[in-house]
Image (cartoon, rainbow, N blue to C red):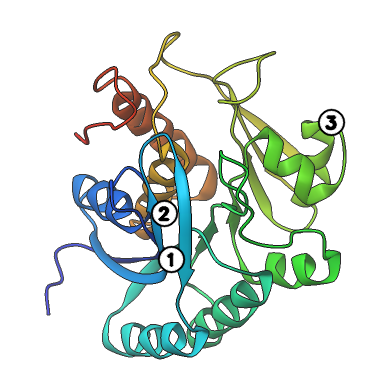
Amino acid sequence: MQTDRPYTLTIAGFDPCSGAGLTADIKTFEQLKVYGLAICTGWTLQTEDKFYSVEWRRLEEVEKELDVMLQTYPIKAVKFGIVPSLDWLIVLTRKIKSHSEKIPIVVDPVWKSSTGFEFADIKNEEKLRTIFKNIDLLTPNTEEVILIADLKDPHEAATKIASQVAVLLKGGHNNKDKGTDWFYNFDRKQEIRPGKTNVWPKHGSGCVLSAAITASMAKGKNGFDACRDAKIYIEKYLNSNRSLLGFHAS
């Protein structure tokens, strides 16, 4: 077994155009010098500009694969992408934390696609509280944080969630202060300013950002420092070309 790079696991969907999902995560992990493991939650049919469908796997299959990965490899961090329900997150995050409470878990709440395709019911506050107890960081954009917290102001929404779990409020969809991210942890709020004033949008940029955060956490970085490092990586990715499918480079 190799020991040069920390093992980092993504649990997410498969995107055949590789802009998002498992393959985007693995490309990010490789560039950031962690060893990527992957478990598929569902097979999506999508391109960089259109989402067609998703075929979910059975939870029992995913659980079995997670058991094998946890028992075989000394996993240092886990990232979640798309899942069909909050119940999946409850089951799988509990399994990870019961194996080791030291494994940080990052959740990218891809619970509604950019085309309006809904993956999970996010209105159950009891289930959300249970999930927040088992994870270490949530990475919503402004639209997602409003949906999750059921508040109109994204910063108030992030503050509400941050009383339970650290939040990186992404600024890509925020027209008032575009590109500025905010890290919330309980009553602490830290700004992460963009290094680039102009970037080219990319399909799957949220997946890449959360994967970069997870890779840094696998190497021992704290939440804020991991988010700050990931900001540098994602800006390089966004500016790698003008198309919706980016190139990865460390």
- The image quadrant where one finds the C terminus is top left
Q: Given the image, on which type of amino acid does mark 3 rest?
A: Asp
Task: Of the two numbered discs 2 and 1 on the same chain, state the one appearing first in sequence.
Answer: 1
Residue furthest top as drawn: 197
Going 78% across and 40% down the picture, which residue do you hit?
146
Q: Residue at label 1?
A: 78
State which tag comes first along the sequence, 3 or 1.
Answer: 1
Q: Amino acid at mark 1?
A: Val
Label 2 and label 1: CA atoms lie apart by 7 Å
Left/right of residue 148 with respect to residue 16 in the rendered view: right
- With 47 as the anchor, is 86 left or right in this view? right
Amino acid on which disc 2 is placed: Thr
From the image, tell me which residue sits under label 2.
Answer: 214
Classify mark 2: residues with Cα within 10 Å, few (<14), some (14-19) or many (20+).
many
* 100 sits to left or right of 66: right
Residue 41 sits above or below residue 244 on the image: below
Give the residue at x 49% y 82%. 100
- Rate crowding at label 3 as few (under 14), some (14 to 19) or many (20 or more) other CA atoms within 10 Å: few
Residue 39 in the image: x percent, y percent? 35, 72
Q: Residue at x 43, y 41 (%)?
A: 209
Q: Are marks 2 and 1 in contact (CB under 8 Å)?
A: yes
**In the image, 120: left or right of 238?**
right
First along the sequence among labels 3 and 2: 3
Q: Position of residue 181 (x, y in %)?
A: 59, 28
Q: Secondary structure at mark 1?
A: strand
Task: Please state, as top left, top right, bottom left or bottom right, where the N terminus lies in the image.
Answer: bottom left
Q: Nearer the viewer, residue 115 or 29?
A: 115
Image quadrant assignment for residue 119: bottom right
Q: Which residue is mark 3?
A: 153
Residue at the image position 66 percent from the left and 15 percent from the top: 175
